[in-house]
Image (spheres, helix red, strand yellow):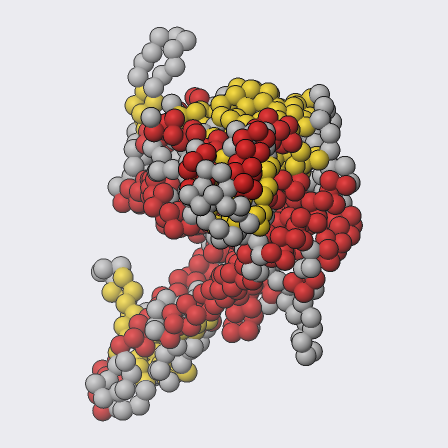
């Protein structure tokens, strides 16, 4: 195993912000760290990186305590940060030097990533007239472009372990695709990545293993497919041309969501779904016992989003009680 | 290979130094400082000479000075005003008159010319020579013109008298030396027990005062400028959140030290540039305006800082002074670093820096207060000694007082040792607090909060 986190805990006064979290990265890929705002994701990541002292727990990398001074770690912080008034090139060269990357290598890598992340016009502004353009500073960039520069900073040392705290938040769809491509490339290159995010569809695209944090506790943890399987195929989506509210009521099912695209219904499993399908086909139990015209009928496992909302919701309800 | 806690300090130093030197604000301030230093001397000289204040080149509107010498002083040469003791004076035409004093006074009454009379006579009974300058009622000569001439005559007579008596300048200095008496009260003690010595404390003289004030000002500049740079740099890194990225590659204490080292060098560079500009302006001014040679002009520069019997700048003193400046700067920048780390953003900085500013004022004005007491009535010697041992005050006080022979090398070394020990402990305190506070986003901290952080040794952010 490469990264092993065991019993990581942190308290501020009486408040526990991270409560005995354990997980491991066994092979290259993306590990998702999910949670609501204030769930303890960033605090956990900071403790792993050694920026914050932990109350208990260990973090090891390849069998030794993880030390970011000794291990090549890339980090994209949730709270983005660049020197606003220094030139982009100056600060990236500085970041590279702190990561023990030689100036020549740093320049080569910066050139590569500048082109890959479509930042050329900001690092090498076009010459207008005879005047040589001034190098650009971070405060001259849009938020999205600053985020790209920060991703560049995280990748500049070609890290073995990459920690991305909310890497896709605030990006437009085009840049989000660009970031996703880069993350895929890093996975293909055999990198270990820990990613925290609120965007469940993105996590589902990348991650095999997840931890969902809620108020500092790991409420769901493990392989995403297995977690979904454990829930079973309990989500039924139905769309018919005729109204079926009386049928749903008659069969005692619970409507989760109702949209123009259909109705999402919670069932206990395959058997209950088959019974309902039979009712739709035969019209049995309906006020008008006629066959319904089925446009869509789907039975599937819950999405990560649904699991997340359910788990976080459960905890919120528990606390309210 | 395991890296030390200070690994990367050099890289932070290089980056901070180069970025500070590149900053527009820094270059603008530097140009202003150079202009101020370079223009101060020539402008002050210009106004001083124009306003009739004390200056080397003095003018008089008197065109002709008539001399009636009834003193019988054979050595006096009234045509040798260049020996007046003043460097330069615009000398009127000097004519020896054969007229009697009364006849010449009658002539002056009606004259509208720019002429004056110097009447030299001796009153044997009083043992006094009188040099009387007389001007007519209708002459346009002003009183200040006569005063200028009066100074020149006094200088000339004195210089020629010395030459006549073959007294050298050194002998004259000895003759002029003030003879003063101190009384020491020594209590009788048994053998092996040191005797307490109570000494009357004389105040500082003008040369010492100027020198001490100069060093206090330089030290204050060095410390306050470096504190300002360090605090704004820390707050900027914290408010822009860049510190979070940096801390994956470097320990907080290395980050703080790299900054302090760079800031110290930049501040030192600024001060040296200012000193250089000032010296250059003095030299150029005297070469251009007064026709001095370069070496004469440099002598003029050296006369600005008087090194004499009251001021000693020995190599040992110099080493101690530099140590005090370095340790003092480190002492204050470590404090400012810790306070700045508790600040969320630039807006909060001024509010949170009050305690640091207060401390700086205590140091600065403590040493100034003692110096002012010395120039008026003389501060008790024990006060100077105690102040030399207080780390907040000693960096401002000891350099000037050591070189002015106000405190002994032993006292200075004890003060330095105390300062070093304070810096050593502050270093640990700052390291621990800085590492904790770098993520701190909470309320203003009190001293006891800092002590708790130091005691608990836990990093964290209350709002994380």
Which residue shows up at 58% across the image and 57% down it?
Answer: A172
Where does the image place residue B438, in percent across and percent down from the top left?
49, 37
Q: Is residue B412 visible?
A: no
Residue B171 position in % (x across, y down): 46, 49
Residue drawn at point x = 68 percent, y = 28 percent: A25
Residue B182's place in the image compared with A84, above or below, is above
Q: With B70 as the anchor, is B264 left or right in this view?
A: right
Q: Quadrant of the C terminus of chain B?
A: top left
> A71 left or right of B342?
right
Q: Nearer the viewer, residue A296 or B267?
A: A296
Quadrant location of the N terminus of chain B? Answer: top right
What residue is drawn where x is 65% and y is 63%? A122
Q: Nearer the viewer, residue A127 or B82?
A: A127
- The residue at the far top in this view is B191
Residue at 29% across, 75% down: B144
Q: Is residue A195 visible?
A: yes
Along the line of sight, the residue nearer the viewer: B120 or A176 = A176
Residue B71, by quadrant, is bottom left
Residue A262: give x, y in percent of width and height: 51, 48
């Amino acid at each position: 195993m490469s990264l092993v986190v065991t019993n990581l805990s942190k308290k501020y006064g009486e408040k526990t912000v991270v409560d005995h979290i354990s997980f491991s990265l066994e092979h290259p890929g993306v590990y998702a760290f999910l949670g609501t705002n204030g769930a303890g994701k960033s605090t956990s990541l900071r403790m792993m990186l050694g920026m914050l002292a932990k109350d208990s727990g260990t973090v090891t990398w390849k069998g030794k305590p993880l030390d970011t001074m000794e291990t090549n770690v890339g980090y994209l912080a949730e709270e983005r940060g660049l020197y606003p008034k220094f030139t982009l090139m100056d600060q990236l060269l500085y970041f590279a030097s702190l990561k023990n990357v030689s100036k020549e290598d740093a320049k080569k890598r910066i050139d590569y990533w500048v082109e890959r992340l479509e930042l050329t016009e900001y690092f090498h502004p076009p010459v207008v007239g005879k005047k040589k353009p001034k190098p650009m500073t971070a405060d001259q960039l849009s938020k999205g472009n600053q985020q790209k520069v920060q991703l560049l900073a995280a990748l500049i040392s070609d890290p073995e372990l990459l920690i991305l705290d909310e890497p896709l938040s605030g990006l437009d769809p085009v840049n989000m695709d660009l970031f996703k491509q880069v993350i895929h490339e890093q996975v293909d290159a055999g990198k270990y990545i820990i990613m925290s995010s609120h965007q469940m569809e993105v996590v589902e695209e990348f991650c095999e293993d997840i931890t969902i944090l809620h108020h500092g506790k790991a409420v769901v943890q493990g392989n995403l497919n297995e977690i979904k399987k454990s829930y079973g195929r309990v989500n039924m989506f139905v769309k018919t041309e005729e109204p079926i509210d009386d049928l749903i009521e008659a069969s005692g099912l619970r409507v989760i969501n109702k949209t123009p695209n259909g109705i999402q219904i919670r069932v206990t499993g395959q058997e209950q779904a088959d019974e309902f399908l039979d009712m739709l086909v035969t019209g049995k139990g309906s006020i008008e016992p006629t066959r319904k015209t089925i446009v869509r009928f789907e039975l599937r496992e819950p999405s990560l989003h649904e699991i997340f909302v359910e788990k976080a919701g459960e905890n919120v309800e528990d606390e309210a009680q | 290979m395991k890296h030390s806690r200070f690994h990367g300090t050099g890289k932070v130093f290089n980056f901070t130094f180069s970025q500070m030197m590149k900053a527009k604000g820094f270059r603008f301030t530097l140009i202003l400082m150079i202009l101020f230093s370079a223009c101060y001397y020539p402008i002050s000289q210009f106004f001083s000479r124009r306003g009739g204040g004390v200056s080397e080149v003095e003018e008089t509107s008197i065109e002709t000075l008539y001399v009636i010498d009834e003193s019988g002083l054979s050595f006096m040469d009234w045509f040798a005003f260049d020996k007046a003791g003043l460097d330069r004076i615009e000398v009127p035409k000097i004519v020896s008159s054969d007229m009697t004093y009364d006849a010449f006074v009658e002539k002056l009454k009606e004259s509208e010319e720019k002429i004056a009379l110097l009447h030299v006579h001796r009153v044997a009974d009083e043992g006094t020579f009188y040099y009387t300058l007389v001007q007519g009622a209708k002459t346009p000569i002003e009183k200040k013109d006569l005063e200028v001439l009066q100074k020149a005559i006094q200088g000339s007579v004195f210089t020629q008298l010395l030459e006549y008596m073959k007294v050298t300048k050194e002998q004259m200095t000895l003759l002029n030396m003030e003879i003063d008496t101190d009384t020491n009260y020594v209590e009788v003690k048994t053998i092996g027990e040191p005797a307490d010595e109570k000494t009357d404390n004389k105040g500082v003289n003008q040369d010492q005062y100027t020198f001490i004030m100069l060093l206090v000002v330089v030290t204050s500049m060095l410390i306050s400028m470096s504190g300002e740079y360090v605090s704004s740099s820390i707050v900027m890194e914290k408010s822009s959140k860049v510190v979070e990225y940096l801390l994956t590659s470097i320990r907080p204490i290395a980050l703080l030290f790299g900054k302090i080292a760079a800031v110290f060098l930049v501040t030192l560079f600024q001060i040296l540039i200012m000193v250089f500009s000032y010296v250059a302006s003095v030299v150029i001014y005297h070469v251009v305006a007064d026709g001095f040679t370069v070496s004469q002009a440099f002598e003029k520069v050296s006369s600005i800082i008087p090194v004499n019997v009251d001021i000693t700048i020995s190599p040992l003193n110099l080493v101690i002074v530099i140590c005090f400046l370095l340790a003092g700067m480190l002492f204050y920048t470590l404090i400012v670093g810790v306070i700045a780390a508790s600040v969320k953003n630039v807006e909060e900085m001024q509010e949170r820096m009050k305690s640091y500013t207060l401390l700086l004022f205590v140091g600065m004005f403590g040493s100034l207060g003692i110096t002012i007491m010395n120039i008026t009535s003389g501060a008790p010697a024990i006060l100077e000694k105690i102040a030399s041992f207080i780390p907040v005050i000693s960096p401002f006080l000891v350099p000037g007082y050591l070189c002015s022979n106000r405190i002994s090398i032993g006292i200075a070394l004890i003060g330095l040792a105390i300062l070093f020990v304070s810096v050593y402990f502050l270093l640990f305190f700052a390291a621990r607090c800085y590492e904790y506070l770098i993520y701190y986003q909470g309320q203003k901290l009190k001293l006891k909060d800092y002590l708790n952080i130091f005691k608990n040794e836990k990093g964290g952010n209350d709002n994380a």
